[in-house]
Amino acid sequence: MQIHIPSDLVTSSTEKSPDQSQHRQSFAAQRLPMLFENDALAVLQKPQGLACQGGTNVKYSIDDMLGDLSPDYRLVHRLDRDTTGALVVAKSRLAAAALTAAFRDRAVSKRYIALLQGVPEETHGTISRPLLNTGTMTTVISATDDERRAQMAKPAVTKYRVLRSGALGNKEVSIVELDILTGRKHQIRAHCAQALGCPVFGDHKYSSAEPTSDSMYLHLFEISVPDVDVAGLIRATSKTGKVAVKAPFPASWAPVFKKLNVPLKCN
């Protein structure tokens, strides 16, 4: 399978990464890219470096931005600070409850694209390895771990498929499609680094390699959620019962795709 990125799904390479104050101004002016919007939900284009929720060293988050717009707006899932892509926001309390339940019950389809350091031994597969989060790190649990750690770990399942591999400078890399069947913190990053032995490119937390990029190449490219109305019910006029949205790749990905001879279109 070839990755194709249509021109309308690539952000301009002339755009500069805004700081947090600029993010706040852009969002308040509704200039943060809105990929889809109706009366019940919106799908935003999340940039790198912007946290979904408040926390240590977080001056302003997407949660804060939503609060500036309306008390009814709320996130129904999360992406790591340096993960980019589609982010779903509910616009009513009942829509939020329905969408949160859909994420919990795995009634949502998510397609991630990542650039990995190295190439997995198998071109496709399923990683079914429990994960233990200690607050700052997530660790894959192995058969040699002690019983207490194993009991504290949570099941985690990630499907992957290698789409393209090649050389980036003197390093072997691969572009991989991933689907998570569970929603653990840092699941893709931990599974890729510790189970596949191929960390996400630019992920300084889960890679011991010398940093070669300021960007982490993990992107939620496509998401499909139930097409609910403001009451949290499937919209009567919906043909499929789903809202499916694709998110543009960050501009910083374009040179990488070019070096790997990947056409600029995505399907």
Image (tube, rainbow, N blue to C red):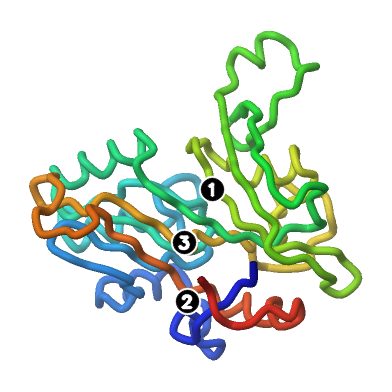
Q: In terms of depth relative to the viewer, which is nearer, 139 or 136?
A: 139
Query: What residue does disc 1 label?
Result: 179
Relative to 243, say whether 135 is above or below. above
Residue 250: numbered disc: none
Q: Is residue 80 above or below residue 156?
A: below
Q: What residue is pinned by disc 3?
A: 50
Amino acid at dot 3 = Leu
- 161 on left or right of 228: right
Amino acid type, callout 1: Asp
For the residues labelled 1 and 3, say whether their Cβ atoms are less than 8 Å apart: no
Task: Please tell me whether mark 2 or mark 1 is closer to you in this view.
Answer: 1
Residue at the image position 59 percent from the left and 83 percent from the top: 264
Q: How far apart, in angstroms, are the residues tagged by discs 1 and 3?
A: 23 Å
Q: How many neighbours does mark 3 have within 10 angstroms: few (below 14), some (14-19), or many (20 or more)?
A: many
* Label 2, label 3: how far apart the Cα atoms are: 10 Å
Quadrant in the picture for residue 195: top right
First along the sequence among labels 1 and 3: 3
Q: Secondary structure at mark 1?
A: strand
The residue tagged with tag 3: helix, strand or loop?
A: loop
Q: Amino acid at mark 2?
A: Pro
Q: How far from the left and from the top, in percent, is residue 188?
A: 61, 45
Q: Using the numbered discs, state the Cα–Cα distance from disc 2 to disc 1 in whole angstroms.
A: 29 Å
Q: Is residue 267 above or below residue 59?
A: below
Q: Earlier in the sequence, mark 2 or mark 1?
A: 2
Q: In the image, is 209 to the left or to the right of 163?
A: right
Which residue matches tag 2?
18
At 66% from the left and 10% from the top, the residue drawn is: 148
Question: What's the residue at 54%, 61% (across, down)?
Answer: 219
Tell me the element at label 2. Answer: loop
Marks 2,3: beta carbons within 8 A = no
Mark 2 nearby-residue class (10 Å; few <14, some 14–19, many ≥20):
some
Residue at the bottom extreme, as displayed: 14
